[in-house]
Amino acid sequence: GDSVTQMEGPVTLSEEAFLTINCTYTATGYPSLFWYVQYPGEGLQLLLKATKADDKGSNKGFEATYRKETTSFHLEKGSVQVSDSAVYFCALSNGNKLVFGAGTILRVKS
Amino acid sequence: KAGVTQTPRYLIKTRGQQVTLSCSPISGHRSVSWYQQTPGQGLQFLFEYFSETQRNKGNFPGRFSGRQFSNSRSEMNVSTLELGDSALYLCASSLYQGNTEAFFGQGTRLTVV
């Protein structure tokens, strides 16, 4: 079945550092790919998405590119802030449900 | 426009009881999906409703059920609660069937004691 694998955390960075959170997937066909963010005590917020190969999703300084050849959708941000501290989930949808990775905790220190 | 609204935010129930959770999707959205989030299992799909019909179901026992009303609001019911049902239950709203782009509510935190 479809699955998503994320790098384990927690990831701890200093403010203004570069962020990469790795995400790879296994799926049949051509899934849509997503990054969601969850702040403490909250639900999930859609951060960005990509629906086909080579698409780049971007939002609030975060970017991810749909790489079909490597089945990856790595999340990047050039300069993180303390307010980016949260749990980040990579997910795919093949048109029937969302399949999530385990989540990566990001901690940003000032 | 208003986001996805889930009520209540917190619930404490006793083993063996049943519980009903409610979700109001974004206005105009016709698909509502439910997910269970636990530290051990992560985020798992429960079911999706679209136009008042269950369209897809995850691997959960029959104690978990749901329904959708004509105004797209959805309820989820869990009967004969077990300790392992303690979780954050998240509702996701989509314009179309299939979770192609889903927007989540804040969730209902259910604790079974």
Image: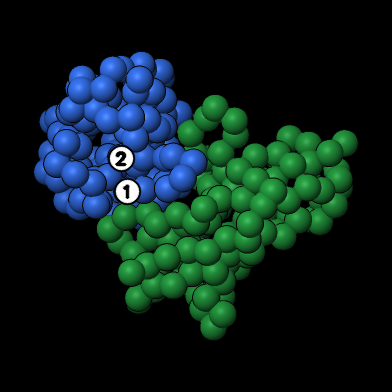
Q: Residues within 10 Å of mark 2 (few under 14, many from 20)?
A: many
Secondary structure, mark 1, is strand
Please name the color used to draw chain B: blue
Q: Residue B113 vs residue A64: left or right?
A: left
Residue A27, percent across and down?
A: 39, 72
**Labelled disc at residue B45:** 1
Quarter of the rendering containing residue A67? bottom right
Please name the color used to draw chain A: green
Quarter of the rendering containing residue A7? bottom right
As drawn, B105 above or below A52 = above
**Labelled disc at residue B53:** none
Which residue has dot 2 on it?
B34
Residue sitting at x 42%, y 48%: B41
Residue B101, percent across and down?
A: 40, 51
Q: Is residue A75 visible?
A: no
Residues indicated by labels 2 and 1 sit on the same polypeptide chain: yes
